[in-house]
Amino acid sequence: MIISIKGKQSYEDMEDETIELVTEGRLDPDGTEGYTLSYQESELTGLEGTLTTFQIEPERITLLRIGEVNSQMVFEQGRRHLSLYDTPYGSLSVGVSTRKMHAELGLSGGSIEIDYAIEIDHAVAGQNLFQINVREKRPILQQ
């Protein structure tokens, strides 16, 4: 699968920061209504050596990162979840409040959108928006 990820971070008094990544990954059915989307991070995201997995369920999306950075973030519309973010420099307590989330996936791909606020040590650190598109990798046409 080809995965296109656009991440936008907005902080007060600062210019928005947008990261775009196109990478290969896997989309696998998980249970009756869920999917697992996974890919290797690159140096572009600053998380090289980290495997990122989205576990998509009808009412909840869980983001897991394993490697250089270890973290778990749970997104559930209208709810706040606390998570731990382990980095080589120490651990942070991170609060995630999901404002809006939408996932439409099938075996041939689809899209995920997550709009959330993040708090670090109980102070709002910014607004984030994930837009992810997944599509089948097309074979290269032979001349």
Image (spheres, rainbow, N blue to C red):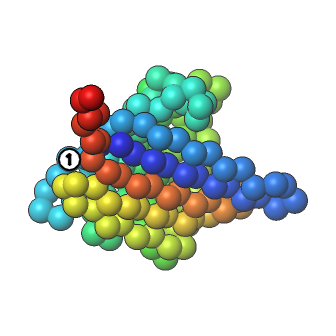
Residue at coordinates 45% horizontally, 48% vertically from top-left?
A: 4
Q: Residue 29: in sight, yes or no? A: yes
Residue at coordinates 57% horizontally, 26% vertically from top-left?
A: 43
Q: Secondary structure at mark 1?
A: strand
Q: Is residue 56 left or right of residue 10?
A: left
Q: Is residue 49 left or right of residue 91?
A: left
Q: Which residue is mark 1?
A: 28
Residue 38 in the image: x percent, y percent? 33, 41
Quarter of the image where the C terminus is located: top left
Q: How many marks?
A: 1
| Front-lying residue, 27 or 137 | 137
| Front-lying residue, 115 or 73 | 115
Which of the 4 image quadrants contains residue 127?
bottom right
Q: Residue 55: in sight, yes or no? A: no
Residue at coordinates 72% horizontally, 50% vertically from top-left?
A: 17
Quarter of the image where the N terminus is located: top left
Which of the 4 image quadrants contains residue 61?
bottom left
Residue type at numbered disc 1: Asp
Q: Is residue 75 left or right of residue 110?
A: right
Residue 75 in the image: x percent, y percent? 44, 62
Label 1 crowd bin: few (<14), some (14–19), many (20+), radius 10 Å:
some
Residue at coordinates 31% horizontally, 47% vertically from top-left?
A: 37
Residue 113 in the image: x percent, y percent? 46, 64
